Image (spheres, rainbow, N blue to C red):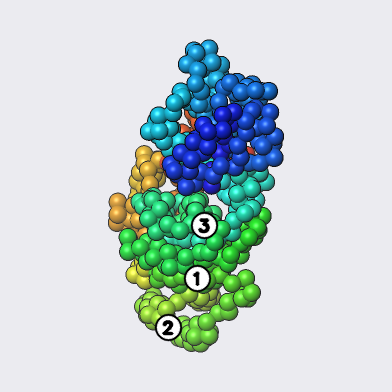
């Protein structure tokens, strides 16, 4: 609701103004009325007022004195004057106190309606952004209060955590296939279509493939709307979307804790290459490894010792294909691949598998969202590991150099490993592996380094650019997400560098 205080010393006009306000928009609430400025100040000091509508000529304290006081002490209140005096000096002094408009009596109902609608739009947009930043800071444990905390304290919330593709287990996630989904589709606009019974805020997730929707209501949540939103998101693209819904939250100070536990639940329960809804329950303990993988692992460990070198790759790929034919949790797939590569490293020589198993698995899984992606990626890596081809080293080095040049030329565009795959003809899940082997860092790390250095250069050289402008220049559509990435990389906020 938008709280309105009306100050007018003539009772009939006061009643008429209040009546017209209530007709314009049901979201306006008359929180109080007063006959003079002094009485109005008492109401303002004891209530939350969003809009002040006042006359000029009143006893005890006139409207101009009231406007000056409110501008000095409550600058966020929107001030609208309705006066019977057309004197230019009155209007000039009123505008010096930051009024929204100066309307003359008798009130033109259509003009009054238009101005109230403009005020409503301005307040709701401003409130949305302020609360969005407040919730974002609460999620990421950055202490902050806002003028709308009273509204938040009266509501209950749910966190809808969305993940496009696999859960991001690699350290750097800037080129993951799922990242492109959120750049391609406007989630806020989609939510406006489906979440009609609640207020909501769309926030960047902890990784580039996650998005957070915080929904708020003072009544009850419509779970069918969440289901319809989930179904629609999964019809838009081939990337599977997983939704993890939190329990009802009544205290915003617990948002960060709930979101952290929610991400753990998402990682434990996300199904590889399949869309699903996860009802997060804090009372459920960590998931144990699927028993069928234990028997598969035992058979693999026994069989690999008897295989000839040229039979190892087909054997592993056949086993993997059998595993993926059944609905598989990502966390089980991670454990299975770790075991497979570990046993492989013990039974082969001349490679550095033991040193890189963890990173190989993480890059493979986070860059795959279909079964064929995973099998093709494993196939390419096994070819490199089991059948070294020194004659192709120079060719691969040139390919990686071409990829690096392409990234620099397009660093501020929505590049993913799929983009590089389409451009250079490599399996997406293999790109990070080959890139790191030749340059020492993954493509995600490479583009992050270039973006961050470019952003820092702009912060130090162009003082007219705002943080949101720099974020857009270096390829980030969300300035909040850019600021968090920047701080993680440099250890300080973009605004701190601008102050130096």
Which residue has dot 1 on it? 278
Q: Which residue is rendered at x = 58% and y = 79% of the image?
A: 288
Which residue has dot 2 on it? 307
Locate residue 427: give its quadrant. bottom left
Q: For numbered disc 3, what is the local secondary structure?
A: strand
Given residues 443 and 482, the one toward you in this image is 482
Which residue has dot 3 on it? 215
Label 3 vs label 2: CA separation?
Answer: 55 Å
- Measured as percent of width and height from the top left, residue 97 is found at 58, 22
Name which of mark 1 and mark 2 comes first in the sequence. Answer: 1
**Vertical placement of residue 95 versus 469, above or below:** above
Residue 1 visible in the picture: yes
Name which of mark 3 and mark 1 comes first in the sequence. Answer: 3
Q: For numbered disc 1, what is the local secondary structure?
A: strand
Q: Which residue is rendered at x = 52% and y = 29% of the image?
A: 80
Given residues 350 and 492, the one toward you in this image is 492
Q: Which residue is rendered at x = 65% and y = 27% of the image?
A: 37
Q: Which residue is rendered at x = 59% and y = 31% of the image?
A: 7
Locate residue 179: give its quadrant. bottom left
Contact, mark 3 vs mark 2 (Cβ under 8 Å): no
> Is disc 1 surrounded by few (<14), some (14 to 19) or many (20+) residues within 10 Å?
some
Residue 351 visible in the picture: no
Q: Nearer the viewer, mark 1 or mark 2?
A: 1
Q: For numbered disc 2, what is the local secondary structure?
A: loop
Label 3 vs label 1: CA separation?
Answer: 17 Å
């Amino acid at each position: 609701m938008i709280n309105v205080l009306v100050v007018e010393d003539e009772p009939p006009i006061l009643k008429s103004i209040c009546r017209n306000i209530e007709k314009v928009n049901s979201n306006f609430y008359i929180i109080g009325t007063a006959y003079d400025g002094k009485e109005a100040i008492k109401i303002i000091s004891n209530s939350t007022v969003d809009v002040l509508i006042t006359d000029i000529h009143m006893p005890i304290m006139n409207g101009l004195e009231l406007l000056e006081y409110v501008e000095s002490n409550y600058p966020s209140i929107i001030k609208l004057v309705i006066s019977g005096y057309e004197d230019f000096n009155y209007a000039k002094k009123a505008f010096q106190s930051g009024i929204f408009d100066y309307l003359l009596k008798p009130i033109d109902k259509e003009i009054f309606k238009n101005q109230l609608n403009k005020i409503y739009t301005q307040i709701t947009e401003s409130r949305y952004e302020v609360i969005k930043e407040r919730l974002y800071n609460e999620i990421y444990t950055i202490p902050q209060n806002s003028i709308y905390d009273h509204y938040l304290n009266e509501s209950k919330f749910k966190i809808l955590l969305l993940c496009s593709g696999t859960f991001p287990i690699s350290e750097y996630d800037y080129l993951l296939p799922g990242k492109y989904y959120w750049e391609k589709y406007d989630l806020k606009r989609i939510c406006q279509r489906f979440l009609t019974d609640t207020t909501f805020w769309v926030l960047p997730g902890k990784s580039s493939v996650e998005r957070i929707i915080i929904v708020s209501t003072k009544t009850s949540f419509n779970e069918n709307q969440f289901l319809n939103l989930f179904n629609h998101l999964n019809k838009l693209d081939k990337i599977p979307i997983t939704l993890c819904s939190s329990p009802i939250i009544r205290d915003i100070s617990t948002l960060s804790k709930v979101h952290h536990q929610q991400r753990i639940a998402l990682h434990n329960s996300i199904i590889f290459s399949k869309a699903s809804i996860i009802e997060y329950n804090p009372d459920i303990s960590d998931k144990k490894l699927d028993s069928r993988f234990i028997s598969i692992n035992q058979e693999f460990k026994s069989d690999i010792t008897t295989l000839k070198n040229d039979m190892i790759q087909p054997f592993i790929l056949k086993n993997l294909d059998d595993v993926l034919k059944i609905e598989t949790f990502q966390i089980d797939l991670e454990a299975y691949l770790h075991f497979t590569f570990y046993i492989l490293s013990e039974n082969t020589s001349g490679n550095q598998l033991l040193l890189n198993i963890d990173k190989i698995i993480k890059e493979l899984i986070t860059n795959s969202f279909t079964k064929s992606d995973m099998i093709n990626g494993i196939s390419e890596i096994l070819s490199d590991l089991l059948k070294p081809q020194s004659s192709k080293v120079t060719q691969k080095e040139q390919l990686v150099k071409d990829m690096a040049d392409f990234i620099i030329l397009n660093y501020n565009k929505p590049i993913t490993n799929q983009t590089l795959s389409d451009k250079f003809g490599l399996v997406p899940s293999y790109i990070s592996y080959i890139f790191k082997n030749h340059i020492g860092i993954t493509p995600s790390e490479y583009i992050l380094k270039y973006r961050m250095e470019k952003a820092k250069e702009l912060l130090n050289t162009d003082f007219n650019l705002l943080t949101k402008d720099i974020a857009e220049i270096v390829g980030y559509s969300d300035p909040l997400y850019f600021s968090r990435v920047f701080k993680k990389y440099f250890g300080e906020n973009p605004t701190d560098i601008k102050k130096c």
